[in-house]
Amino acid sequence: MDRRSIRKLDHIRNALITLENGANSFDDVSFVPNSLPNAALAETSLDTVIASLRLSSPIMINAMTGGAGGTTQINQKLAIIARERNLAMAVGSQMAALRDPDVTDSYLIVRREHPQGILFANVGAEATVEQAIAAVEMMQANGLQIHLNVMQELLMPEGDRDFRGYLERIQAIRESLDVPVIVKEVGFGMAKESIEKLIEIGIRTIDVGGRGGTNFAQVENMRNDQPNAMFEDWGFTTVESLLEANAVGHPGVSYIATGGVRHGLDVVKAASLGASAVGMAGAMLRLVQRESLEDCLSTVDRWHHQIRVAMTALGMKGLADAVCTPVMIAGKTAERARLRHVQ
Ligand code: FNR
């Protein structure tokens, strides 16, 4: 097996191990109860809009894999779940397929299983305009994700070391594509300064990809046999990143919250902090690796039900109502947000 395939399979195995500890920043967020919500569960709607695309669920299966043996089956199962529950889905980085057409099938299976679905292509910020266009065409994608993963690259012995020119390339890609572009972090979160730079170059959908779920510093340290290595608490958590996004306060920009989303209540918490949708990667991976398709679908149904329960109890009809719902932010999240003046 070649080095790239080994790396991808290592990522999958290590991601599952790093996820075992379930507490994260969403636990610092709680709702003010509403004893008179004047709402009905049957009237709640899960519809939302991201990147100008209408979705019937705020849960999106976020970018994970493709490009190595074994990843075709994972992508196929994820795509069937996406199709059966009408979830948007992103494929993993297509940089591998752009360099080696032999591995495209592991991505194409997603479009084959979910022909009518909202699918996102995925490239790194090192991609050229031509590669970005090719990635979208390959998937007949409805949008393109460009991932930012500087710390992960730096921790990979074979990773990139030169991060110059990202903004210019992202802008050129955005201007050349006729589908929306989402810029996403992969679990290190985003500060308002980075968000502002992306907005300045015309990006209108940002996935803040915060710390709290899959920890790529830990994943890489495990691969490289450095169990006590540093940088594992680098960056902002997902809730901190959403507070940063709030501090930017730019109308017309929509946010996706990825990073440690575990269930329906986290989705409503993310929505209350301004997210229009959430991405789930690690939790979905764990599900498809451990459960039958039927059980995976029941779990997604349970998450959707939990969202409706929280919405009803809070008096919400649509997810957009969540931003008007008072929340309390406690603990380390509150303390750190005060230091940043974002709360
Ligand atoms: C990822 N993620 C990712 N993101 C991306 O933009 N391109 C990619 O190729 C990958 N690859 C990848 C592989 C595996 C095994 C995992 C678990 C994740 C990152 C993913 O989309 C997400 O941003 C983070 O995993 C944080 O979300 P969770 O896992 O905490 O829900």
Image (cartoon, rainbow, N blue to C red):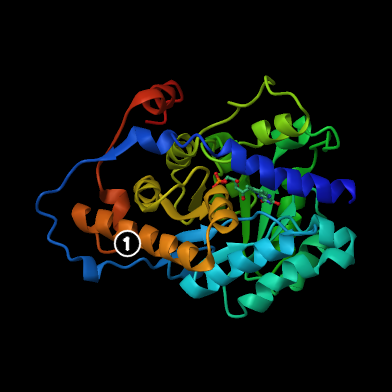
* Relative to 314, residue 225 above or below: above
Residue lying farthest bottom? Answer: 116
- Which amino acid is tagged 1? His
Disc 1 crowd, CA 10 A, few/some/many (<14, 14-19, 20+): some
The x, y position of residue 37, in whole percent, is 14, 56
Q: Residue at x 60, y 69 (%)?
A: 79
SS at badge 1: helix
- Front residue of 25/1: it is 1
Q: Which residue is mark 1?
A: 305
| Label 1 CB sits under 8 Å from any ligand 1 atom | no
Q: Horizontal placement of 135 versus 100: left or right?
A: left
Q: Position of residue 212 (x, y in %)?
A: 51, 36
128 or 218: which is nearer to us? 218
Q: Quadrant of residue 45?
A: bottom left
- Horizontal side, residue 302 vs residue 155: left or right: left
Q: Is residue 53 left or right of residue 139?
A: left
Q: Position of residue 120 (x, y in %)?
A: 64, 64
Looking at the figure, which quarter contains the C terminus? Answer: top left
Image quadrant assignment for residue 227: top right
Question: Visible in this render: residue 125?
Answer: no
**Residue in the image at 43% along x and 34% along y:** 25
Q: Position of residue 301 (x, y in %)?
A: 39, 65
User: Count of labels shown?
Assistant: 1
Q: Quadrant of residue 46?
A: bottom left
Extreme residue in the left direction: 36
